[in-house]
Amino acid sequence: MDRSEFRHHGHALVDWIADYLAGSERYPVLARVAPGELRDALPATAPERGESFDVIFRDFERLVVPALTHWNHPGFFGYFAITASASGVLAEFLSAALNQQAMLWRTSPAATELESVTLDWLRSLLGLPPTFEGVIYDTASISTLHALAAAREVAVPGVREAGLSGRGRLCIYCSEHAHSSVDKAAILLGLGHQAVRPVPGDDRFQLRVDALRSALDRDAADGVTPVAVVATIGTTATTSVDPVADIAAVCRDRGIWLHVDAAYAGVTAMLPGQRAHFAGWDLADSIVVNPHKWLFVPFDLSAFYCRRMDVVRRTFALAPDFLQTPEASRGVKNLMDTGIQLGRRFRALKLWMVLRHFGAERIRETLARHMSLARRFAEWVDADPDFERVAPVPFSVVCFRARPSRGVAPAELDAFNERLLDAVNASGDAFLSHTRLNDRFVLRLAIGHLRTSDEHVSRAWELLREHAASLAGRAHQPSPL
Amino acid sequence: MDRSEFRHHGHALVDWIADYLAGSERYPVLARVAPGELRDALPATAPERGESFDVIFRDFERLVVPALTHWNHPGFFGYFAITASASGVLAEFLSAALNQQAMLWRTSPAATELESVTLDWLRSLLGLPPTFEGVIYDTASISTLHALAAAREVAVPGVREAGLSGRGRLCIYCSEHAHSSVDKAAILLGLGHQAVRPVPGDDRFQLRVDALRSALDRDAADGVTPVAVVATIGTTATTSVDPVADIAAVCRDRGIWLHVDAAYAGVTAMLPGQRAHFAGWDLADSIVVNPHKWLFVPFDLSAFYCRRMDVVRRTFALAPDFLQTPEASRGVKNLMDTGIQLGRRFRALKLWMVLRHFGAERIRETLARHMSLARRFAEWVDADPDFERVAPVPFSVVCFRARPSRGVAPAELDAFNERLLDAVNASGDAFLSHTRLNDRFVLRLAIGHLRTSDEHVSRAWELLREHAASLAGRAHQPSPL
């Protein structure tokens, strides 16, 4: 593709993407294809002769687009809602063209230093002290993996060289509501899944510090070495907040690494009104916050902050001959030293462009607006006798379920809510996901897309009421909204 | 940024990128900034008020561009040369806008199924049998990590649940020239760095199978359990090829997991004339090939093929309540089950667009052309009494060094070649990297950029001769080319 062809196809793509970013509502949020439909529509082998980009793009529109679930849609309320904002998308376009591989400072001074600058900007917005050094990974799974690898390095002397064979028992402590990435990290690190001690939560789904202390005491008596405690600010199911300050005190007393998973909710530390949720997180050894979740940055970009990045480097730094550079003696950072991945994309560019294009003020306003939309939705749920809310709403996620006063037996409520979820998701206007809490099937509405407005949330509520009523076999009452 | 603003900035960016992709030669390949220069030029905090994209882009051009090392430049001959081709860049632009997160089939049927289709296309082009199932990871480091995690799962019964504590000694075998990702994986997996047994290579830098057998025998007698053997097709320093068929026979006899690292050179299996290098790789348990290296796909995209993907799933699958979906019972694949990362970008889109836009024929022609350029460069080195080649050239990388017949004492040759490398890289027209072989400082010229032509390679050779002559204190002899 020469320069003029690139211009031609690029301009057409800009127009298509402009329409998409402004009007993704034209598509159903949840893909309507059946499993295997896209696969079966494509040839079994690559073409022998090259094809024109126009032909490829037509197939993209005809075959790929119907198989998309539109995360970049204001009616996306599943899991944690995310946004690829316009400035972030343009930054990724540039980043792809520049094709930086920032393993060493010299292989991309720009990516290396912009990463450090933008992570300092974000750290400062979050109110964390400069003792936290940052590094960008792809996902929170990888950030938490590095946190726990560093914790293992501290807890098990010599583990980098000699490994775990022949060692005694080791444990990681987290709430029963902690993210599955803790389990996966324990497996990968060779600690084993059994090394994860799920500590019970209270009725607000917050880790019980008394239960943590008991578990630590019991294990200490059994000769088990604690590797780390993981506290969560914004758990995945209910966005509950563990009592980080109390947990930090326990960790300090016992000399245990504290990792804080704030992948989703961490960005709200920018709001003065939210600071109570973050009390004590500055005492953590490591923290993960994901700008690709609720900071309008296209996926993927996970920010990992650590007060002991020297331990991360001690765990991973390993420079073969061909990667020795003269700058090493001049104190530059080489990103490959802080992690398992040698190759590093130029992810900082999108964080830089998004932070500048939005500015701190508009970011705070948007987060506050999303939380206010969630509170309003929670009020509707609370006021409706046919629905019940099942968890507090500290951020922008509401956990609730239908509980029709007539027509559905209590034993059928799980199945009823599953059908309700499917019906709402089939509408194409809204997509919600679910979880299980106290052994009940629960619906989740997560607000986080930049363009999600009052109307989108109202529409979701209307769909929920309408389908709940019709599934319960009653005539639909028009929404009072 | 509304639709018309996005169009405005997007069109401007398309024009900039069109010029960049066609004319990155206007920039020096290796960045000329000093450490800290970009960092110091930027403010210490994010702006409070949002800024226009024009202002941000001006800063990009003024501050970021001079701090780039231009990997997407035809004079980039360092490490492994890579290319973000036009169709790949457009695909990444689309992928950023769509913001897919393909953890579950339902969260992106498109990304899930296109990944499976394109990896089958690539597998078939590589001549591997359909018994190999593929999955896309970010980097070869992560692919190799998953290979070794699966190998550990097989070698150490119950390791997923119970971990490595209390187990006997475990080892991983690879050539002394294997990539550092093997070492990092051993550390992360809790095997310890000492678990990596570097097996000596021969004078062609190929793993010595007799030495592998001896190491295995010695360890078996000591009660050490072998976890895996890693063979490399295209080692990082010299691109040497381990005798995979012989290694596979050893692994089969002893029931050891064989992982083949073909991250760089694997794509050349598409060329009938190269097949000898790949004899026996279809007997491996797992293979990594990186389309972001030498297949014109923007960074990052690593293809992992495995004959035992069930073991990878057994190692990592772990579905919390909120990720249980009805499709699971209908046999769909959920990408989150094949690995440590829960979140998955829509990387397959760029592989699909590049494979279609190029077509297999042009890919094979380009790889052959790059290898032919490397052979020609090797001939120039061989023919010049002031230079010597220090390794065979099976692919597109030439390892060599200057050895001026006059003016440089043998003991000074390392320092001389370091100065030569710096001088050539300072020219801005070419960037080469180095390695150490047999305790000597060695220069590497790696060809892999799509637009690298005869002229770029000739220019690099001219610069090398010119600077070698001038550093050796002699008058420059005009190149005979």
Image (spheres, coloured by chain):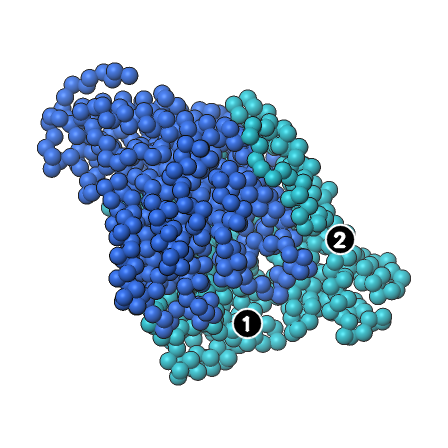
Chain colours: A cyan, B blue
Q: Amino acid at mark 2?
A: Ala
Point out residue A344 in the picture as x, y percentages from the top left corner: 42, 45
> Viewer-proximal residue, B31 or A321?
A321
Point out residue B389 in the picture as x, y percentages from the top left corner: 23, 32
Q: Residue at x 25, y 50 (%)?
A: B200
Residue A442 sits in which quadrant?
A: bottom right
Q: Residue at x 50, y 59 (%)?
A: B311
Q: Name the residue at the right extreme.
A: A475
Q: Specify whether A438 is left or right of B284.
A: right
Q: Amino acid at mark 1?
A: Glu
Point out residue A474 in the picture as x, y percentages from the top left corner: 88, 64
Chain designation of label 2: A
Identify the secondary structure beneath mark 1. Answer: loop
Judging by the rendered image, the residue that carries numbered circle 2 is: A426
> Gap in Å between the C-alphas at discs 1 and 2?
32 Å
Q: Residue at x 44, y 33 (%)?
A: B272
Pick the quarter of the image with the C terminus of chain A.
bottom right
Residue B432 sits in which quadrant?
A: top left
Name the mark on residue A191. none
Judging by the rendered image, the residue that carries numbered circle 1 is: A176
